[in-house]
Structures are given as C-alpha cells and as structure tokens.
C-alpha cells in the first residue's frame, strides 16, 4: 500500500489484488535473530536500492531496529548484477560481521552470488525465504511462499468466475517460517543456539 500499488488492503481499487508476502515489521525480527546467533555482532550489512519502494521502506525499518539492538547498519547500493562487485567490496571495507538480505529485485537477481559471498567471508546471513537456505544460506525468516501460492489459486478461481480484482481485499501472509541450514552453520564454525533450533519450522541437515 505504501508503495502505491493499491489504494488500501481492504479495497485495492484498480486492477490489482492478491496476496502479499511483504511484511516490513519482520525486518526487526530478522536483525534480532542475527543477534541471537551468539556471535558478537556489532555491524550488519544490508543491500538496498533507493529507487525501489520496498527496499527503501525496509531499510528504514532496519535502521530503527539496529538502533534498538545497539548495532550499526552498513547500507550498500545494489540495483542490478552489474552493481554487485562494488557492493561486495563496500561490505568488506565496512567490516560487516553479518548480512540481512532483503527481498527486492536487485538482491533477488544476485541471490546465488550473495550466498557464496557470505560463505567465503564467514558471514552469518539471514534471508527472507527458505529458498535461500535450500541453496546454502544460513537462516531465513519470512512468509511461507508455498502457502501463499496455494491461497493465490483461490483468487484466480474467483476472478475467472467474474469477481473484480478491485473488490477483492489484498491478504497479507499469515504463515511465517523459520528455516536453518545446519550444514552452513558448521561451515561457518557457528553453533546454533538450541532455543533457536526449537523454534525452527525446518532444519536442513
């Protein structure tokens, strides 16, 4: 809604509706989870694109959360794969000790390279969805995209039967999942706290 895609969640207007995996309040939780890993993390790196509405809003949430947690945030510009090398070099110069990776287009396009960078530089990183963790990322916390896809099928069915998108409220994801990759944790010489493992929806061995 803040990005201007719909007028409101209840009455989207126009020709757009559906389900949203965007939950800006989860940004604070992701930073908090990084702090729970047990390492003395004082500087966290984030990628961002100031022209991307979601990225801009997410960074504001990250900045507020970082202040509350007593950590410093290092923002590096990433819009396209051509920006990636400069972004990664900037993270090295900043001396970040962990990464919090947003789900906007610029970061998604460089997903594999970001995971490889985190591994090569021994950086704990948290992502927005389990897809990152399956590919070797350490931890993710966010909307269950499988559940969203299943719910989306119902919207398609209603529209095909004549419902107007403008009259169908936008639903926000209600199913969240925490996924942890223990193989990646071992490679980082990181012991995941038992309290965190017990809360995980999936642990990849």
Image (cartoon, rainbow, N blue to C red):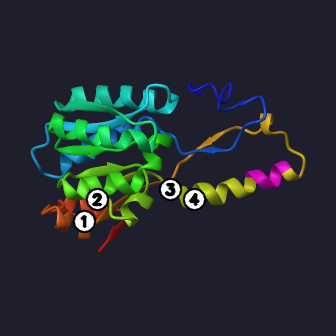
The span from disc 3 to disc 4 (Cα, nearest Å) is: 5 Å
**Lower sequence index among marks 1 and 3:** 3
Foreground disc of the pair 2, 4: 2
Foreground disc of the pair 1, 4: 1
Badge 1 is on which residue?
184
Would residue 57 appear left or right of 148 to someone viewing this image?
left
The span from disc 1 to disc 3 (Cα, nearest Å) is: 21 Å
Estimate the x, y position of residue 89 in percent, counting from the top left: 24, 40
Q: Residue at x 57, y 27 (%)?
A: 3
**Lower sequence index among marks 3 and 2:** 2
19 relative to 56, above or below: below
Badge 3 is on which residue?
144
Would residue 97 appear left or right of 65 to someone viewing this image?
left
Badge 2 is on which residue?
138
| Chain part drawn in magenta | 155-159
Answer whether labels 2 and 1 touch (C-beta < 8 Å): yes
Foreground disc of the pair 3, 2: 2
135 relative to 142, above or below: below
Answer whether labels 1 and 4 touch (C-beta < 8 Å): no
What is the secondary structure assignment of the residue under circle 3? loop
Quadrant (top left, top right, bottom left, bottom right) of the C terminus: bottom left
**Lower sequence index among marks 2 and 1:** 2
Residue placed most toward the observer, 16 or 200: 16
Question: How many neighbours does mark 1 have within 10 angstroms: few (below 14), some (14-19), or many (20 or more)?
Answer: many
Question: How many neighbours does mark 4 have within 10 angstroms: few (below 14), some (14-19), or many (20 or more)?
Answer: few
Q: Which mark is residue 147?
A: 4
- Residue 65 highlighted magenta (yes or no): no
What is the secondary structure assignment of the residue under circle 2? loop
């Amino acid at each position: 809604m803040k990005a201007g895609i719909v007028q409101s969640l209840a009455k989207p207007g126009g020709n757009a509706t559906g389900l949203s995996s965007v939950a800006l309040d989860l940004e604070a939780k992701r930073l908090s989870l990084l702090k729970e890993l047990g390492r003395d993390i004082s500087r966290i790196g984030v990628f961002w694109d100031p022209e991307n509405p979601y990225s801009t809003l997410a960074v504001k949430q990250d900045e507020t959360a970082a202040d509350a947690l007593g950590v410093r945030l290092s923002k590096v510009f990433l819009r396209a794969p051509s920006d990636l090398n400069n972004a990664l070099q900037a993270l090295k110069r900043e001396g970040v000790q962990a990464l919090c990776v947003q789900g906007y287009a610029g970061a998604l396009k460089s997903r594999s390279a970001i995971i490889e960078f985190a591994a090569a530089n021994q950086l704990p990183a948290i992502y927005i969805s389990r897809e990152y963790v399956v590919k070797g990322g350490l931890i993710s916390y966010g909307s269950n995209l499988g559940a969203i896809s299943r719910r989306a099928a119902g919207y398609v069915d209603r529209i095909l039967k004549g419902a107007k998108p403008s009259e169908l409220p936008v639903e926000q994801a209600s199913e969240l999942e925490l996924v942890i990759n223990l193989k990646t944790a071992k490679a980082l010489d990181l012991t995941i706290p038992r309290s965190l493992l017990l809360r995980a929806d999936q642990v990849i061995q």
